[in-house]
Amino acid sequence: MKSINASGHKTGLAPLGAENETVMRAVLPHGFSVDMVDLLLADLERGVAQLRENPRSTPLTRADVGGFTHSATAAVPISTANESGSKR
């Protein structure tokens, strides 16, 4: 059974007791090898271990995180990204 969230997207119901779990979805290209999956999982395990060993004392804000949006608006304004002074 699926439900619709506030953004209008379909969501799967979380298993009992997992309502507050964060899920990461990865879309992998056709032909992604087992060896590449092993490397990806090892990288994720190292990253999770590092986060557990070094927890943040304050939560990140949306501005701190940035991230992907479905809009055409850049998460980081283009003007700040090109302020290196170089001309093309």
Image (spheres, rainbow, N blue to C red):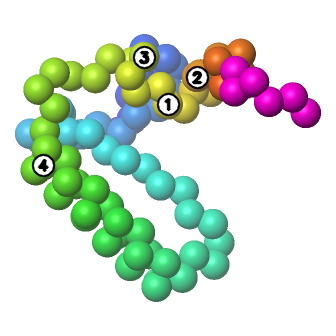
Q: Residue at x 51, y 19 (%)?
A: 8
Mark 1: which amino acid? Gly
Which one is closest to the eye, mark 3 or mark 1?
Answer: 3
**Along the polypeptide, which appears first: circle 1 or circle 2?**
1
Q: Quadrant of the C terminus?
A: top right
Q: Would residue 40 appear left or right of 30 to someone viewing this image? A: left
| Range of residues picked out in magenta | 82-88
Instruction: Please say if 4 is above or below 31.
Output: above
Which labelled disc corresponds to residue 67?
Answer: 1
Please provide percent x and percent y for residue 55: 13, 38
**Along the polypeptide, which appears first: circle 4 or circle 1?**
4
Mark 2: which amino acid? Ala
Please provide percent x and percent y for residue 10: 47, 31
Say few, some or many: other residues with alpha carbon within 10 Å of mark 3 (under 14 / 14 to 19 / 20 or more).
few
| Cα distance in 3D space between marks 4 and 1 | 21 Å
Q: To which quarter of the image does residue 13 belong?
A: top left
Q: Residue at x 64, y 18 (%)?
A: 80
Residue in front for this viewpoint, 59 or 78? 78
Instruction: Please say if 73 is above or below 1.
Output: above
Residue pointed to by mark 3: 63
Residue pointed to by mark 4: 52
Is residue 42 located in the magenta-colored stretch of the structure?
Answer: no
Say few, some or many: other residues with alpha carbon within 10 Å of mark 1 (under 14 / 14 to 19 / 20 or more).
few
Instruction: Please say if 75 is above or below 17.
Output: above
**Along the polypeptide, which appears first: circle 4 or circle 3?**
4
| Cα distance in 3D space between marks 2 and 3 | 9 Å
Residue in front for this viewpoint, 9 or 3? 9
